[in-house]
Amino acid sequence: LGNTPTLICAPNTGRTMASPSPSKKPKTDGNVQDFINSTNSAYEELHLAFEEQFWGTKMNLGGGSFSVEKLSATKEAMEAMLRDPSQLAKAEALLAGDPQTGQKIVVSPDQRQVLECFVRTFKCYQMRDPEAVELRNQANAVENALNEQRNKTFKLGYRPPTTTEGATPSGATPSGATPSGA
């Protein structure tokens, strides 16, 4: 996970959204950048919580901090944010402009790229049928039950093969000499 922020979308410029110098920063609607920043911040928080639970449960770390129930909750929270129709509508509206007045909202090329990525991402998660959302949740529950059973059944960790002292499974010692020392 490191220190790299998890973002839904960032411009493909090799720099972050905050890096343009003030003199080169385009004059844009502040609401656009606020939406981009708040969306990426919310996603980063939800994704980090999910990732911690994902790896904690996959590695069977336990200790009360990691559980299948917490994994399910963090995954559902992240996916709920991504499938929220208001997120999609807001990103589309910022790209399209004001439908009442026909006035375009000024967005920089970087902002346009990020908003277009938001739209693509949010569209992938749209589930307008509540029954589909429920089926998704049921599938997650089955997956988590399997994960929990795996954690109870399989022991994780390295177990070296059984060999004679100093010999590798093929019969040669690590130095390449024969076990008898000849």
Image (cartoon, rainbow, N blue to C red):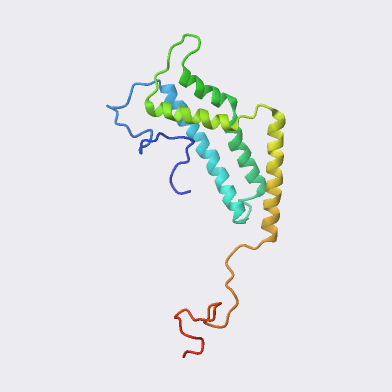
Q: Is residue 179 above or below residue 133?
A: below
- In the image, residue 95 lies at what x, y percent? 46, 21
Q: Seen in the image, is 74 located left or right of residue 111?
A: right
Residues 121 and 57: in front is: 121
- Residue at 29 percent across and 28 percent down: it is 22
Q: Quadrant of residue 85?
A: top right
Vertically, is 24 above or below 177?
above
Q: Residue at x 68, y 37 (%)?
A: 136
The quarter holding residue 108 reads: top left
Count how many numbered circles sit on residues in the image. 0
Where residue 28 appears, as percent x and y from the top left, is 37, 21
As drawn, which residue projects farthest toward the left?
Answer: 23
Which residue is at 69% across, 38% downward? Answer: 137
Query: Which residue occupies the extreme top position in the image?
Result: 101
Asked if 31 appears above or below 176 in the picture, the reply is above
Picture coordinates of residue 116, whole percent (x, y): 47, 28
Direction from residue 70 to residue 165 in the image, left or right? left
- Locate residue 156 relative to residue 34 in the image: left or right: right
| Residue at 55 percent of width and 83 percent of height | 165
List x then y, in percent, for residue 177. Answer: 46, 84
Camera-side residue: 79 or 46?
A: 79
